[in-house]
Image (spheres, rainbow, N blue to C red):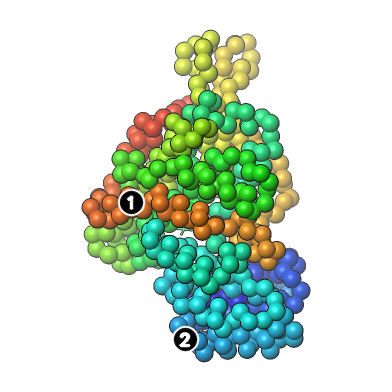
Amino acid sequence: FVVLGASGDLAKKKIIPTLWWLYRDDLLPDHIHIIGYARSKMSVADIRAKAFPYMKVKDSEKAKLDSFFAAMSYVQGSYSEEDGFKKLDTAIKAFHNGNKANRLFYLALPPTVFAEVTQNIHDHCFEHEGWNRIIIEKPFGRDFDSSAKLSNHLSRLFDESQLYRIDHYLGKEMVQNLMVLRFANRLFGPVWNRDNISSVLITFKEPFGTTGRGGYFDKFGIIRDVMQNHLFQVLCLTAMEKPASNNADDIRDEKVKVLKCIRPLKLDDLVLGQYVADPEGTGDAKEGYLDDPTVPKGSVTPTFAVGKFNICNERWDGVPFILKCGKALNERKAEVRVQFRDVPGDIFSNGVVKRNELVMRVQPNEAVYCKMMTKSPGMNVEPVETEMDLSYNLRYKDVKMPDAYERLILDVFTGSQLNFVRSDELSEAWRIFTPVLHQIENEKVNPIPYKYGTRGPEEADVFIKAAGFHYSSTYKWVNPNL
Ligand code: BG6
């Protein structure tokens, strides 16, 4: 397992800790060897020191941790020149049975070096008896053309079956559960359509800003960072037809079909926001996006966006899929909210009966709950709102929920591409977003300011309401743990 970019942030915060958790739980293959590769002069001890704060090691696991790092080595080399990659190849071949070892290359690298690194891996590290797999992380380009250029480059070098494009939302428990909920329950299948569903709201909220990564973020913005990938994957799994089987390509075929039914997004179907400081706030809340020294002065990059999409097919035409995402908001939350139509012919007092909603909460506190009406307990025959609730930490008390990266890296070892993005999914997603992204940039469309720690711009709530999502403040989900 070669971690390219071993000195970087992603490696220390995610990849090395994830490999450790898998190793700790005996989920990695026997005789695994991990090689860090980067330009800096460093050692395994340095990698250990950098990653340790993120590894959550218990005192009782110290011996195992030592054996994990004993299975690691480091190769220093440049990304653009072949020498380093030849050295890497020699280092792998020097292991016992090294020539037969299967090789997995994780590109924990900035996109600027993707092309040269993959070329070098292909040219100098691919000649041996075992298999080769490449894991790459977004951003897969910035728009349709740059993404196509990268895809063409990769497809010249590798077979699609060797490529694992990570979208870590596909490794989340509840995102993986979407297929089971939909296709293993008779309860939902027959009503999962435009006749019964009035809108679908997919939300991603984070309570912190871009501090520390403003420089990166500003080149991409929230639409490329979250909506075009994470939220679109969730949209596809929510909207797709039942695949012929649960194998990777059958599922990815269905996702692509959904995307093909979505027209390019228009500016009118978007609300954009950018967070500003909350002078009364504490800590980071005192800094707006533009106060981050790594963000260019006067940047109009959105940190918040709501988009409305129509899936123009038999099942969904006319049902708005509303995708909302933002940084520096009032809470951390990611969920899918399927809102049903009004009950026709209401026989109860006007307005009491509220719409049903099926909510799949991705994080925090995974839960599936159904908002429904019941008779208010007692003498009266009055409908009241309630819920049928499957809260994971109550129902599955002792189950350890693996981190998204743990599942995904394990999938790569086992050769399952089900939870990875295929190149045609990617190009369809870029087709939908590229025109509006270019328009926003060319016209320097001003995002609406919203205060750090709020729900986002009020205009977004107005837009969501107008799009057809009914919000009644009468219901609040009560955390059953409290
Ligand atoms: C990443 C984005 O892909 O996902 C980040 O680049 C975002 O901006 C992160 O914070 C959210 O991931 P999670 O797993 O914390 O919801």
Query: Looking at this rendering, what residue extends furthest in the front direction?
Result: 156
Helix, strand or loop for disc 1:
helix
Choose between 147 and 27: the one closer to the eye.
Answer: 147
Find residue 169 and report its horizontal and vertical position in percent.
55, 53
Q: Is residue 301 left or right of residue 239?
A: left
On-image quarter of the N terminus: bottom right
Residue 61 placement (x, y as % from top left): 72, 71
Q: Quadrant of the C terminus?
A: top right
**Residue denoted by label 2:** 81
| Residue at left offset 61%, top offset 35% | 369
Nearer the N terminus, badge 2 or badge 1?
2
Residue at the location (45% across, 55% down)?
A: 427
What is the quadrant of residue 31 in the picture?
bottom right
Residue 326 visible here: no
Question: What's the amino acid at mark 2?
Answer: Glu
Q: Is residue 461 visible?
A: yes
- Kind of residue indicated by mark 1: Pro
Q: How many labels does the image show?
A: 2
Disc number placed over residue 435 in the picture, else none: 1
| C-alpha distance separating marks 2 and 1 | 36 Å
Mark 2 closeness class: few <14, some 14–19, many ≥20 residues within 10 Å? few
How dense is the environment of label 1, judged by Cα within 10 Å: few (below 14), some, or many (20 and up)?
Answer: some
